[in-house]
Amino acid sequence: MQQILAWVDGLSWGIVILACLTLGLAPFAPPHIVEKLRMLARGDLVKPVDWFDLLLHGAPWVVLIFKAALSLRR
């Protein structure tokens, strides 16, 4: 776990934000992550491809949250 946190901490803020704005929001109208989160809330996220999509588009946001938490912890 420490290695993962060290890797996230070593990432550039610019790269993390760029990943969130591109992969995290693509396609942009409406943002795919928003659509997948709505499906999750409704209980419609049942196909494996939908779960993969949620993980793919959500990963940059998870990294951003971890990086922000590590920065605030200091």
Image (cartoon, helix red, strand yellow):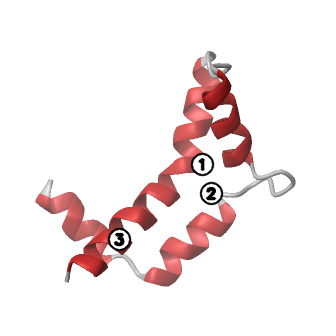
Q: In the rendered view, tell whether residue 56 sits above or below residue 1.
A: above
8 vs 44, left or right, is left
Q: In the rendered view, tell whether residue 23 sits above or below residue 17.
A: above
The residue identified by callout 3 is 67
Q: Residues within 10 Å of mark 1 (few under 14, many from 20)?
A: many
| SS at mark 1 in the image | helix
Residue 11 x/y as whole percent: 36, 76
Could you give the CA–CA distance between mark 2 and mark 3, rounded to whole angstroms?
A: 15 Å
Label 1 is placed on what type of residue? Answer: His
Quarter-of-image position of residue 56: top right
Q: Residues within 10 Å of mark 2 (few under 14, many from 20)?
A: many
Q: Residue at x 51, y 59 (%)?
A: 60
| SS at mark 3 in the image | helix
Label 3 is placed on what type of residue? Answer: Lys
Q: Which mark is residue 24?
A: 2
Sequence order check, earlier mark of 1 and 2: 2
Which residue ends up furthest to the top in the rendered image? 46
43 vs 74, left or right, is right
The answer to whether mark 3 and mark 1 are in CB contact below 8 A is no
The answer to whether mark 1 and mark 2 are in CB contact below 8 A is yes
Residue 2 x/y as whole percent: 12, 60
Label 2 is placed on what type of residue? Answer: Gly
Q: Residues within 10 Å of mark 3 (few under 14, many from 20)?
A: many
Q: In the rendered view, tell whether residue 35 sits above or below residue 5.
A: above
Q: Residue at x 87, y 54 (%)?
A: 29
The residue identified by callout 1 is 57
Q: Residue at x 20, y 69 (%)?
A: 6
Sequence order check, earlier mark of 3 and 1: 1
